[in-house]
Amino acid sequence: LLRPLDNDTRERVVEELVKWSGILSQGREDYRPMTHEEVAEMANSKFCEIGAHTITHSILSTQSTDGQQKEIIGSKKFLEDIIGRPVTSFSYPYGSKGDFGENTIQIIQKAGYKIACANYQSLISRKSNIYSLPRYLVRNWDGEDFARRLQRWFRG
C-alpha cells in the first residue's frame, strides 16, 4: 500500500505506524544501512560494483521529471562522493516495466550511466536495451537451491 506513495507521505505513514504500534523506531543492528566506510571498502573489491538506486526508493514513473532527476542524479553524486570514482550503473527501484518509462531512461542516459537494470526475468541478447536490462532475482538460497534455479532459468 505504501509503495506507490511519494517519499514524504510514506515516511509520515511509517512514523504513525511506529507510534501506533508502540515499538522502537530503531531497527535491528543486522538490518542497519552500510556505513560510508563499508561502501568504500566494498567498492574496492574486485568482486562487486557499486551502482546507484535512487535516494528514497520511490517508483520513478510516479515522480515528476524534476523529481526523477533529483533521485537519479542525487544518488549518483552521493555514491561518487563516497567511493571517489564515477558510478556508471543504475538499478530501477522495484524495476517492473511500469515503474519507469522512456523519460526515466533519458534522464539515466543524460546523467552519464552506461547501463541500467530493471526487475523482470529474461535473458540478455544483443537486441536488449542497455538501459532496461532484465535480471533474475536472487535470494539467500543454499547452494543446491541456487543451482536448481540456475538450471531452470537457463534451460528455459
Image (cartoon, rainbow, N blue to C red):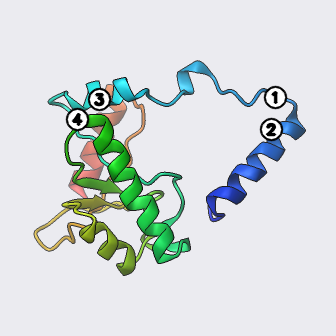
Instruction: State the residue in front, 46 or 144.
Output: 46
Q: CA distance from mark 3 to mark 1?
A: 33 Å
Q: Mark 1 sits on what residue? A: 23
Q: Give me the disc on residue 40.
A: 3
Q: Estimate the x, y position of residue 87 in percent, counting from the top left.
A: 24, 49
- Eye-nearest disc, 3 or 2: 3
Instruction: State the residue in front, 156 or 101.
Output: 101
Q: Secondary structure at mark 4?
A: loop
Mark 4 or mark 2: whose residue is earlier in sequence: 2
Mark 4 neighbour density, 10 Å: few (under 14) some (14–19) many (20 or more): few
Q: Secondary structure at mark 3?
A: helix
Could you tell me if the residues under marks 2 and 1 are in contact, i.e. CB atoms within 8 Å?
A: yes
Amino acid type at circle 2 is Val
Amino acid type at circle 3 is Ala
Amino acid type at circle 1 is Ile
Q: Estimate the x, y position of residue 9 in percent, counting from the top left.
A: 71, 59
Q: Give me the disc on residue 18.
A: 2
Mark 3 or mark 1: whose residue is earlier in sequence: 1
Q: CA distance from mark 2 to mark 1?
A: 6 Å
The answer to whether residue 8 of the structure is visible from this angle is: yes
Q: How many marks?
A: 4
The residue depicted at 69 percent of the width and 27 percent of the height is 26
Work out which quarter of the rendered image holds the N terminus and state it. Answer: bottom right
The residue depicted at 73 percent of the width and 31 percent of the height is 25
Q: Give me the disc on residue 36.
A: none
Mark 4 or mark 3: whose residue is earlier in sequence: 3
Amino acid type at circle 4 is Cys
Q: CA distance from mark 4 to mark 3?
A: 11 Å
Is 144 situated left or right of 114 in this image?
right
Q: Secondary structure at mark 2?
A: helix
Q: Give me the disc on residue 48.
A: 4
